[in-house]
Image (cartoon, rainbow, N blue to C red):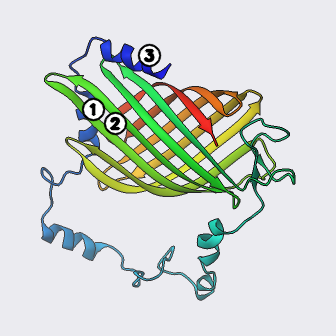
Amino acid sequence: MMPVLVLLVTAAVPQDSDRLKKFERSVASDRDDHKRSGDDRKRERQDEPSCPDTSREWKPSCDRTSSDSDHSPAEFFFYPFFDHGRRFEKYPFAQEGPYFTDDGHSEKTVAFHLASTAGWIEPGLWSVGAEGVLSWSSGCDVRFDVVHFMEKVEGGVDQLTLTQAQLNFGVTPDLSPVNFTIGFGVGSLEGELVSETGATLQANLEWHVREPVSLRLYGGIIGFEDASVTDLRVELGIHRRRFAVTAGYRSLISSGGEDLTGPTLGFTVYF
């Protein structure tokens, strides 16, 4: 299904819109055109309220009380490395569980799924993407996502790539058809006019509604030096044992006002 979509979009009549270039310009740092002098930056820093040195310890505010310092973040950072009882079925809707389970009959402590997608934004502009997710017994997962945009322009093909790597924490009960995670990570945007890297925050909900249907809602934001990009996804999945076909919508919205939005088709396999 995906190859057919890509071929159809590739054959479409190109529009000389340079939409990828517009998106890149809305995210790119203004280091060349609007660079402020060092004196201006110094004056701005002098006007800002000063906080104690926090280079070695994170503090939420300048007036942090002594009692706050008693709460160590160690438990949060070591949480992913402990077994908190989550178990998995072989694949969604297998046996008695929807996939996320703590039933004694399952000894599966690690699960992995790999998805590929193809998307269409407008004639001559399309995308291909891949996502891998490794989940384990703490309720956490590591997610790697890359989406590559291509646009037919005069003289060739313009390209833009968004890459994200994330660590997420599960916040729903283990024995549940819903898996809701929140987390953080790092993202990069690479194109002819832009090369940016920044931190990411995201939330992801997977709901195995009823065999064979699942629903996914995803929202994330990547903060770059002078701009940010919001990544929104909605997907409907139809499952058959280890495999699923997905149809959805994905939108990348830059804080500069440009967006790359369109429908997607995909295929997922569970291990």
Q: Nearer the viewer, mark 1 or mark 2?
A: 1
Disc number at residue 4? Answer: 3
Looking at the picture, how far across and down is residue 59, in whole percent? Answer: 50, 77
What is the three-letter code of the residue carrying label 3? Answer: Val
Image coords of residue 48 (percent x, y) = 32, 73
Mark 2 surroundings within 10 Å by alpha-carbon count, few (fewer than 14), some (14 through 19), many (20 or more):
few
Question: Is 210 above or below relative to 232?
Answer: above
Label 1: element kind = helix
Alpha-carbon span between mark 1 and mark 2: 13 Å
Residue 257 numbered tag:
2
| First-in-chain label (1 vs 3) | 3
Counting residues from the N terminus, which is met first, the one under dot 1 or under dot 2?
A: 1
Residue 191's spot in the image, x, y percent? 25, 41
49 relative to 112 in the view: left or right: left
Kindly indicate the quadrant of the structure image that contains residue 44: bottom left
Q: Which residue is mark 1?
A: 20
Question: Residue 218 or 111: which is nearer the viewer?
Answer: 111
At 44% from the left edge and 27% from the top edge, which residue is drawn?
118
Q: Secondary structure at mark 3?
A: helix
Q: In screen coordinates, is 233 left or right of 17? A: right
Q: Nearer the viewer, mark 1 or mark 3?
A: 3
Amino acid type at circle 2 is Gly
Picture residue at 71% right of the left edge, 39% below the top: 91
